[in-house]
Image (cartoon, rainbow, N blue to C red):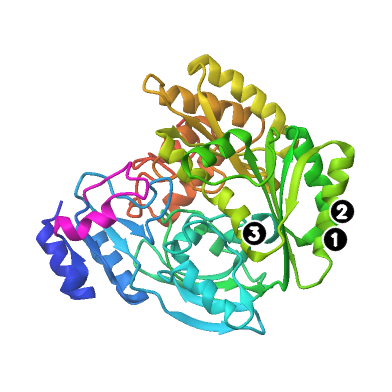
Amino acid sequence: MTDRSQLLSALADVVGGRYVLTSNEDVAPYATDWKRSSTGVPACVVRPASTSEVAGVVRHCRELGFTIVPQGGNSGLAAGAIPDSSAGQVVLSLNRMRAIRSLDPVGMTIEVEAGAILQTVRENASEVGRMLPIAIAAEGSATIGGVIATNAGGLNVLRYGMTRDLTLGLEVVLADGSVASGLRHLRKDNAGYDWKQWFIGSEGTLGIVTAAVMRLVTVPRHSVTTLLSVTNLDAAISLFELTQQDIGEALSAFELISAQSIDLIERYAQLKSPIAAGEWFILLEATSSLSGLRDAAEAVLAAGFEIGWVVDGVVAESDMQARQIWALREHVTEAEARRGSSLKHDISVPLTRMGAFLADAEAALESVAPGAGLNLFGHLGDGNLHYNVLLEPDHDQQAINRVVHDVVVKHGGSISAEHGLGQYRVDEWLRVAPDADLRLASTLKTALDPDGLLNPGKILPSKLSHSKAIGETI
């Protein structure tokens, strides 16, 4: 490998010496993931301020034999933006590229640089009566580039879709240092391949997103928030079907929280549920520019009581009460962390298979971790469940991962619903993914990044032979 001093000199020529970080103190925030469970040793951290500087950094790293780990707000949950311990990877932080280039309230688009903080983008849109409907817990630190690279989900997927559905155009620096500029503010564009889709959710392994055009929506004038407890999962799914029928496209969130999760919240986050417990709790939110939402929500609640699905429920009477209800959902993960160690599974299964999945997963888990506690919650409306196992010292984490993921695959689900594969789930994805998926992924990686320059070890192993890429067993 070329001498590191040559790399540092070359990068300083591109971005300025003060933006090439090398001391342990300066590098530390970029070398450890948000969960503090993965720490690497980068060759350095480089902080370019423009697309041309990103391109220059890529060219120098390629020429000098250093790989690149792109990083946004470093708030991911799969260690997808953390370097390895080889000191041969450069962390390329986009946190200086924060400009909001344009905001069009008529065409309802916003063009921003990759390092712009999601919350800031949302606030700018709100000032002109528009909304970027990507709502995630880390919005105060997550960047647009990171949100796109992971195809972030969040609380509004049910109504507005994933980040992929809100991205109209991208500017991307490719592995050879060239720039692909597709910053189109268009809802319709069928001219050629829709290449932006290759980079959304690719976790920086195919190219580095430097700017994006995002689709905005109008800010709803009315909202209603309801917390319900239900008798069982079948009742929750039936209630979801009824809510879709009676509230329709105004339904923006239908969150599922287990009774065990509520217990954790009350014990470790000192929050109290305002309603009596059932087997599951449902947080329902609907938003619209039209009135009548409250009547519709109350009608759903009444129907649920009459049929016998609902144990108890409350409709928020004020914004304050709505925030208190949402606080229960938002503190589930914090309460889990205060309780102790856990093994997280970000999975999705078809709603019609959810009950069977939970029954099979419970039996499979009992075979490798008898008596293990669970913290189950998630976005029932889009089939995304956070299946978190509360760990004890004698638990075999690898065995737990395998049995849970095997049951997910059995029921036609995905082992990574919204957090990405990162480092954490690469081996498991290679184990359970269909051969066709692996061949396509490796072929695309080879085509766009033949030297393995970009974020090695994420999504695919660091070294993947051509023979495997074209069809041999991985």
Tag shown at residue 403: none
Cα gap from disc 3 to disc 1, whole angstroms: 18 Å
Position of residue 471 relative to residue 293, above or below, is above
Task: From the top left corner, tell me how far across and down residue 361 is, in percent.
Answer: 60, 25
Magenta-tinted stretch = 23-41
Task: From the top left corner, tell me how far across and down residue 347 is, in percent.
Answer: 57, 39
Q: Which residue in the structure is indicated by mark 3?
A: 321
Q: Is residue 151 within the magenta segment?
A: no
Task: From the top left corner, tell me how far across and down residue 148 is, in percent.
Answer: 50, 61
Mark 3 vs 1, N-terminal side: 1
Q: Amino acid at mark 1?
A: Asp
Question: Are discs 2 and 1 less than 8 Å apart at CB?
Answer: yes
**Identity of the residue drawn at 57% across and 48% down:** 328
Dot 1: element: helix
Mark 2 vs 3, N-terminal side: 2
**Identity of the residue drawn at 42% across and 42% down:** 460
Q: Is residue 385 visible?
A: no
Position of residue 394 relative to residue 42, above or below, is above
Structural crowding at the residue carrying mark 3, measured as other residues with C-alpha within 10 Å and reported as few (<14), some (14–19) or many (≥20) = some
Q: Amino acid at mark 2?
A: Ala
Q: Which residue in the structure is indicated by mark 2?
A: 299
Q: Which residue in the structure is indicated by mark 1?
A: 295
Position of residue 318 relative to residue 257, above or below, is below
263 left or right, relative to 106: left
Quarter of the rendering containing residue 11: bottom left
Cα gap from disc 2 to disc 3, whole angstroms: 20 Å
296 left or right, relative to 265: right
Front position among marks 2 and 3: 3
85 left or right, relative to 282: left
Q: Amino acid at mark 3?
A: Gln
Question: Are discs 2 and 3 less than 8 Å apart at CB?
Answer: no
For this rendering, which residue is in front, 83 or 197?
A: 83
